[in-house]
Amino acid sequence: MIIKYFSWIKEHIGKSEELIELPDDVKTISELINYLSNLNDDYKKVFVKKDLIKIAVNKTYCSVETKISNNDEIAFFPPVTGG
Amino acid sequence: MDQKKKIPVKIKIQINDFDVSKETKILQENQTGAIVSFVGVVRGFDEKINSVIESMTLEHYPGMTELEIKKIVKQSYERWDITGATVIHRIGKLLPTDQIVFVGVSSRHRQNAFDSCNFIMDWLKTKAPFWKVEENEHQKKWVDYNLSDDEAAKKWSI
């Protein structure tokens, strides 16, 4: 699975994207957030603000309940500020 | 009238500047009676944090940005009788007075172009994945989103 990070989330985590092998028991975005938060404090500090974070699966907005698989591209980013 | 027709749509994400008069001219065709365009420009001062902006850098999510803008434009031409639409958004480092975004819509009659242009801009502000960071000699700050942008988009009740 590819995970992409943008804006201040990318800076806090220290990378713009990464490849991970999804553990068998991680089946939703919510479970992915829990899994990442337990990896280290950088993720934990970002995902503690999860109410402020937007999520996309395969470049489409989704919710924390969305089901995911190893072939998906996930993105975490703050509310958008273009225009 | 069939509102689900296909119309000429141009969507560009680019570093380079754009020429407003050239883009407006492209929207002119035989059936066009009105063209409404919007140009967003970099301000030199952020009144919310009372700070000078010396430059601004825009990043985006390649692929998703284009998809989101396409969806917004599609909703727009399904809702209003328009004859063409162009959205150009710049990325990278920009300076005060630089142009950031162009939205142009053509239609047979003016109200459809006014409404459609307004709608596209309101939804672009809340859905298209761009992020701005404002810079001056003292700090670099990611711009916070505006609750008023959400309210502006909601007024279209889709």
Image (spheres, coloured by chain):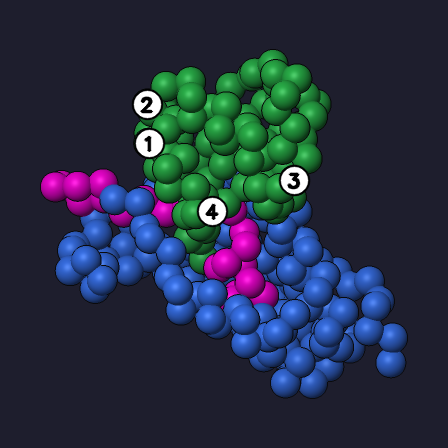
Chain colours: A green, B blue
Determine which of the numbered discs, if any, sits on residue A45 in the image: 1
Task: Tell me the amino acid under the disc marked 4.
Answer: Phe
Camera-side residue: B83 or A77?
A: A77
Q: Chain of mark 2?
A: A
Q: Are marks 1 and 2 in contact (CB under 8 Å)?
A: yes
- Residue B60 in the image, given as x and y percentages of width and height: 49, 41
Determine which of the numbered discs, if any, sits on residue A66 in the image: 3
- Residue B39 in the image, given as x and y percentages of width and height: 45, 65
Image quadrant in which the C terminus of chain A is located? bottom left
User: Against B133, is B22 above or below?
Assistant: below
Answer with the quarter of the image where residue B85 lies.
bottom right
Mark 3 packing: few (<14 Cα in 10 Å), some, or many (20+)?
Answer: some
C-alpha separation, residue under disc 1 versus residue under disc 2:
6 Å
Task: Tell me the amino acid under the disc marked 1.
Answer: Lys
Residue A22 included in the magenta stretch of the image:
no
- Residue B129 in the image, given as x and y percentages of width and height: 51, 47
Residue at far front of view: A25
Write down the residue under mark 4: B130
**Mark 3 residue element:** loop
- Provide the residue span drawn in magenta: B120-140
**Mark 4 residue element:** strand
Image quadrant in which the N terminus of chain A is located? top right
Q: Earlier in the sequence, mark 1 or mark 3?
A: 1
